[in-house]
Image (cartoon, rainbow, N blue to C red):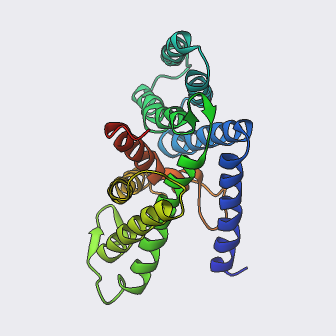
Amino acid sequence: MNSTVKRSIFGVLFLAVMLGGLLFYKFLYTFLFAFISGGMLYEFYKMTMGTSFRSSQREAIIAGVFLFLLGNLYFFGNHRGWTIGLGIFLVLLLMTETLFEKDHTDFQKTGFLYAGLLYIGLPLALSNAVVCQNGEFNGLLMVAFFCIIWASDVGAYCFGMLLGQKIWPAKLCPNISPKKSWAGYIGGLLMAVLAGAILKWTGLVSFPMVHCLIMAALMHVMGVFGDLFESMWKRAAGIKDSGNIIPGHGGLMDRFDSALFAIPTGYIYLLVFNLV
C-alpha cells in the first residue's frame, strides 16, 4: 500500500476514534485517554530505559494510568482530598519499589521514571479539567483544542512541503529536527489561527474572537516546542519514531507530543482571562 494512502486511511481512523471518545460518553473518553496515557509512558520508557528496570517501568506505567484516573475522580467527583494524597503516595511507592530491583548498576536511569510521569502522566491527568464543565462531561472544548493542533500540523506539513524544500529552505531547528522549516512554522501558525476563527464562526466555542485567535497562536507556538521536545528525546535515543501503533504515523508520542504542551497552554490562557 502506498505510504500516503496508508497515512491517510489510518489518519481518518485515528480522527474517528478521537472524536468518538470525546463527543459521546465519559466512559469512552476515560478509557481512551487512560490507554493513551499508558501507551505513551510505555513508549517513553522503552525509548529512554530500554530493558533496564523492567518491573519499575511497569509500576510507573500503572502509576501514570492511575494518576489519570485519579484526575478523573478529582474533577468529576467529590473526592479531592484523598485523590491528591493517593497520587502522591503512588509516586512515593514507585520510588520505594526501585530500591528492591536486583541490579542497581544504572540506578540513575530510574530518573526517567519520574520524568515520564511529569512529562506525560501529569498533563494527561490534568486534561480532565478540560472536559469537565460544572461537574459534567463535555468534550467540545477538547475537540476545539485538537482542531487547532491538527490544523497547525496540517499547515506545517503542507507549507513545509510546498515552500520549505526549495523556495524557503531555512530550517527551524536543524540540530534537533532537520526537516522542520520556517515555512512550515509560519504555515502552521496561519492554519492554527484560521482554525481558531472557524471555531468561533461555527459556534463550537463561545469565546470572543480576539481570544480565539490569540489562544490558537499560543497553542501553535507551544505545540511546536512540544514536538521539538519529543524530537530531542528521540534523537538522544537514536530512533525515528517512538513506536508503530498507528501505521504511517508512528507511535502515540508522535501523535500527542505537541498536545502535551499545547492543550495546557490553551486551557491556562482561558483560565487567566476567566473564560472557563
Counting the numbered discs, the total is 0
Image quadrant where one finds the C terminus? top left
* Residue 211 in picture, x, y percent from top left: 34, 53
Q: Is residue 17 left or right of residue 219?
A: right
Question: Residue drawn at (55%, 13%), measured in percent from left and top?
Answer: 86
Give above or below for 102 relative to 192: above
Where is residue 52 drawn, in percent x and y? 54, 34
Q: 233 or 189, which is in the foreground?
A: 189
Front residue of 253 and 258? 258
Q: Residue at x 43, y 25 (%)?
A: 107
Q: Residue at x 59, y 60 (%)?
A: 250
From the viewer's side, name the closer residue of 3 and 30.
30
Q: Is residue 106 left or right of residue 97?
A: left
Q: Position of 268 compared to 21: left or right?
A: left
Q: Is residue 63 visible from the viewing direction of this image?
A: no
Which residue of the protein is positioned furthest toward the bottom in this rendering? 167
Above or below, comparing residue 48 to residue 125 in the picture: below
Q: Residue at x 37, y 45 (%)?
A: 265
The image shows residue 197 at horizontal and vertical percentages of 43, 65
**Residue placed farthest to the left in the image?**
170
Tell me if I can see residue 27 in this picture: yes
Task: Give coordinates of residue 20: x percent, y percent.
Answer: 71, 52
Quarter of the figure with the N terminus: bottom right
